[in-house]
Structure formats: structure tokens, C-alpha cells
Image (cartoon, helix red, strand yellow):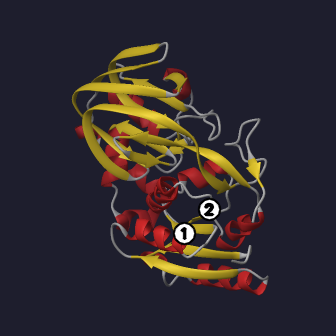
Amino acid sequence: MSERKALLILHGKQALNEEVREAVEARRAEGWELAVRLTWEAGDARRLVDEALAAGYTHLIAGGGDGTLRDIAEAMALSASDASLVLLPLGTANDFARAAGISLGPHDALRMLDAPAHAIDLGEVGGQLFLNMATGGFGSQVTANTSEDLKKLLGGAAYLFTGLSRFSELHAAYGELHGPDFHWQGDLLALGIGNGRQAGGGQLLCPDALVNDGLLDISILPAPQELVGTLRDLLSGGLGIGNMFVRARLPWVEIKVSEGLDINLDGEPMQSDNLRFSARPAALRVHLAPDSPLLGEGGSAQPQG
């Protein structure tokens, strides 16, 4: 199969996106053979990835929001294929793409087909893989309950609006976290377990996370007495909030909570009171610029073909 042949797996809601269509046509005019397939329901991403790999594609493109990118990244990693992934961010938050320095414009994003592929880590919990971050506590509820109409109207600010309107539901959760040489217990307001750096439309929870260090960044926001004031600062990017976090960098961490902790996994909600998160090193090859903020020294750029 040609080295300049790729398959774009595009979220069905983007089927009529003219900017994407123009970007695809531009890459075709430059010699890339680009086929396009659409997802419509759960399970489509895994099926389309399997079909693409069976057909011999070595370059796949994930077009959609953070959830779509996660689904395709997970399917590719589970296939144990050598195929590489290009990210075409088309969602509201696009948290992983923003942190990685990937353009939100389809034309520039598709130029990453010509960039080197780097072996990056993925996170794993409960048999599921994630590309960006798992968030827990009130922030994950905000993300899960922000309406699609509001996201269309306000973009990333929709998460802030939803959070500010839901103070009455705010409560802390008692939790215990432990990993290698690390133990923390107490009431927490928010939790981030990051392969990437931000979640919830730009909240920088794990500011130093790297995707090629074989570790997960853990950020815990302990619950102070004045919960509402703290949340207002968190959601609006208030000064000094970073100093309140307890942080660690671990290959794995186990979490136990006294009540069900709402977890958001790259946009998908899940719930459990006992979870083990771990890093899966070099699980996927992703096209990133050599100066991507998420790449640490010693990252493995690999030739294309």
C-alpha cells in the first residue's frame, strides 16, 4: 500500500463540515490518498479501525471531539498494530490537542500527516484506555452535564457556565489514593489523573504531564472549608489555585472513596468506588510536532512508511 495513503474516521456530526471537506481535498491534491468513513453509534470506531488495519492502512486520522479521539486511540492500541494516528480535533474542548500543540484548523491539523510519529503512553482503568485524562469530583459532573446546545452556543465557556450554575450540588468526597511511595487521604473537591495536561474545556489540572515518560500525573484538589469560593476560582482560572493541589507522578495509583466518585474519562462518564489507574507506556504511535509541549526528552520519533 502507498506510503501516502490514509483513512479518516470522522464523527457523523461532522459529515457536512465544509472546512474538513476542503482540507481533505487539499491533501488529496498534494498526493495523499485519503478515504473517509463516518461513525454513527457506539462501537463504530472500533469496527472502522479494525477494517482499516485489515485493509492495510498504516495512517489513520481521528476526526472529532475528545471522546472520538479516545475511542480510536483505544481501538488502535488494543489492535497492537504499528499504524500511526493523526488527530483532527473537531470538538468543543479539544483538550488533548490544545495541550499537544495541534492546530484546531483542519487544514493545519492534516499537515501532521507529514510530521514524525512518536510512541506515546496511554492511561488504563477498568479495562479501558484513555488518551488524555480521567477527572473526578465536581468538575467531572460539570463536564458530563453540559448540554450539547450550550456547547454549540458558548464553546468551551459552556463548562464554566454550567459549573457556576450548579453550586447547590457541590459536595466533597472522601478518598484514599496510594501508589509507589505515595499515599494521600482526605476530602477532595477535584481529581485529575493525566496523560495529557488539561480537561473540561481548558482547566489545567496536570500542568507538567508528558505523554512519553511512562507515568501518570496525579493532581488532587483537597476540599477546604469554603467550597463554593474555591470552585469559583477553579472554574474561572483564579490566581493561586495551582498552589492548592497535591501532585505526584506515578506508574499506577489506586483510588478508594467512601461513596461513588463520578469519573469522566476523556468525555465519557463512569462510576466506581474502587479503581486502579496505570500507565501503558509507548502504547500508540501519534503524529506530533517534535517541539510538542507533551513530549519529554528522549521521545521516540519514528520514520514514516
- Quick one: which residue is furthest to the left in this view? 259
Label 1: few (<14), some or many (≥20) within 10 Å? some
Residue at x 48% of width, y 17% of height: 180
Asked if residue 246 lies left or right of residue 22, the reply is: left
Q: Residue 252's spot in the image, x, y percent?
A: 46, 28
Label 2: few (<14), some or many (≥20) within 10 Å? many
Q: What amino acid type should be assigned to the residue bearing mark 2?
A: Ala
User: SS at mark 2?
Assistant: loop
Q: What amino acid type should be assigned to the residue bearing mark 1?
A: Leu
Is residue 173 in sight in this rendering?
no
Mark 1 near mark 2, Cβ–Cβ under 8 Å?
yes
Is 229 above or below relative to 2?
Answer: above
Q: Residue 1's spot in the image, x, y percent?
A: 69, 77
Q: Which residue is the site of mark 2?
A: 83
User: SS at mark 1?
Assistant: helix
Q: Nearer the viewer, residue 229 or 293?
A: 293
**Quadrant holding the C terminus:** bottom right
Specify the label residue 53 is tagged with.
1
Mark count: 2
Specify the label residue 278 is tagged with.
none
Residue at x 39% of width, y 51% of height: 161
Q: Residue 279's spot in the image, x, y percent?
A: 51, 36
Quarter holding residue 22 = bottom right
